[in-house]
Image: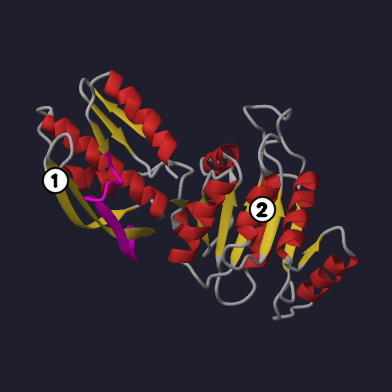
């Protein structure tokens, strides 16, 4: 569920949605008190769909159709086909539809905004730490040569689900390594459950990142591991973690050059002290086999910021 509101002065209220019925009713009642017409981006006359995935300037993008046909309160329409969105996932596509409605409301208010300008704005939009795929040069800076690197600040179970849906659509069969750090006030088990129940995850590296410049809200990696163990038990998923003797045996097998699945079908959980340790561990893991796979940094916007800052050296 997307809970984005965009106020267009002086007369329109654009809602993203879809909302729970009682939430939408509350918002509409508030709009009525302001005598503001309501535009609902997810109304039945509007639709958007992701048709395929492609690569644009070395980064993944989703090819989408966005069609807006508003007939309630005011009339406006726009048909954008084959829009190349750098922001991946169904939730980002819905955000794009909402942004399109905002632009159309501005156009109705007298702004000179063409359909092609809307398309250009959507196609050039990107957010640091949100569905952010690094370039090959940026991956090299992190010591992850040849790997696909995704940075996403998901930190709730809802955003974790959206992240996994995005990965499943774009890379359904690719090896996945996750690097996770989280704040102490988040639903760690719920977050882990969504990641583990998505597409196949091979290894999860649990670490720590400063939250708002300090450590008082940082979750120790060992406590994160406990949450992921609990989530795996709830889902009946086999794991091997670095507190088990089996973990040491698997590392020995890997160091001896075994080409078998490192976890023998189980997901590996490991704790690392910091981002640099995770980068070294991820590089070793991803060098196995011909396919480099994907490494995903997530769990907190602070983790995403730490990765992005590392690109500057």
Q: CA distance from mark 2 to mark 1?
A: 41 Å
Percent across and percent down for residue 241 are 80, 61
Quadrant of the image containing the C terminus: top right
**Residue 1 in the figure: left or right of residue 109:** right
Q: Which one is nearer the viewer's eye here, 88 or 14?
A: 14
Q: Residues within 10 Å of mark 2 (few under 14, many from 20)?
A: many
**Residue 262 in the figure: left or right of residue 305:** right
Any mark on residue 77, and which?
A: 1
The residue that appears at 68% across and 58% down in the rendered structure is 204
Q: Are marks 2 and 1 in contact (CB under 8 Å)?
A: no
**Residue 113 in the figure: left or right of residue 56:** left
Q: Secondary structure at mark 2?
A: helix
Nearer to us of marks 2 and 1 is: 1
Percent across and percent down for residue 140 are 52, 56
Any mark on residue 160, and which?
A: none
The residue that appears at 74% across and 28% down in the rendered structure is 216
The residue that appears at 71% across and 75% down in the rendered structure is 265
* Residue that lies at the very extreme toward the right in this rendered image: 245
The answer to which image quadrant residue 38 occupies is top left
Residues drawn in magenta? 40-58
Percent across and percent down for residue 126 are 37, 44
Percent across and percent down for residue 100 are 24, 42
Residue 1 in view, yes or no: yes
Q: Which one is nearer the viewer's eye here, 134 or 300?
A: 300
Q: Which residue is mark 2?
A: 192
Q: Residues within 10 Å of mark 1 (few under 14, many from 20)?
A: some
Point out the tag, 2 or 1, that comes first from the N-terminus.
1
């Amino acid at each position: 569920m997307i809970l984005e509101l965009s106020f267009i002065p002086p007369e329109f209220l654009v809602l993203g949605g879809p909302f729970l019925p009682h939430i939408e009713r509350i918002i509409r009642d508030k709009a009525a008190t302001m005598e503001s017409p309501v535009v609902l981006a997810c109304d039945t006359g509007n639709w958007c769909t992701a048709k395929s995935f492609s690569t644009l300037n070395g980064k993944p993008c989703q090819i989408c159709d966005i069609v807006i046909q508003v007939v309630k309160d005011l009339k406006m329409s726009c048909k954008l086909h084959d829009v190349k969105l750098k922001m991946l996932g169904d939730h980002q596509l819905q955000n794009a539809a909402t942004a399109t409605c905002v632009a159309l409301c501005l156009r109705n208010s007298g702004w000179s905004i063409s359909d092609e300008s809307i398309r250009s704005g959507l196609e050039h939009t990107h957010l640091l730490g949100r569905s952010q795929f690094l370039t090959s040069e940026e991956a090299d800076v992190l010591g992850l040569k040849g790997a696909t690197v995704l940075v996403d600040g998901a930190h709730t179970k809802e955003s974790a689900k959206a992240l996994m849906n995005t990965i499943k659509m774009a890379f359904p069969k690719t090896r996945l390594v996750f690097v996770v750090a989280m704040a102490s006030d988040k639903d760690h088990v719920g977050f882990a459950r969504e990641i583990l129940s998505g597409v196949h995850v091979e290894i999860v590296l649990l670490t720590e990142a400063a939250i708002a410049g300090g450590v008082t809200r940082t979750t120790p990696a060992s406590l994160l591991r406990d949450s992921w163990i609990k989530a795996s038990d709830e889902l009946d998923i086999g794991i091997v973690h670095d507190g088990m003797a089996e973990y040491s045996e698997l590392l020995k097998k890997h160091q001896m050059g075994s080409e078998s699945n490192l976890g023998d079908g189980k997901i590996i959980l490991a704790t690392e002290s910091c981002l640099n340790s995770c980068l070294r561990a991820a590089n070793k893991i991803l060098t196995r086999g011909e396919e480099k796979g994907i490494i995903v940094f997530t769990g907190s916007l602070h983790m995403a910021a730490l990765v992005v800052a590392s690109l500057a050296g």
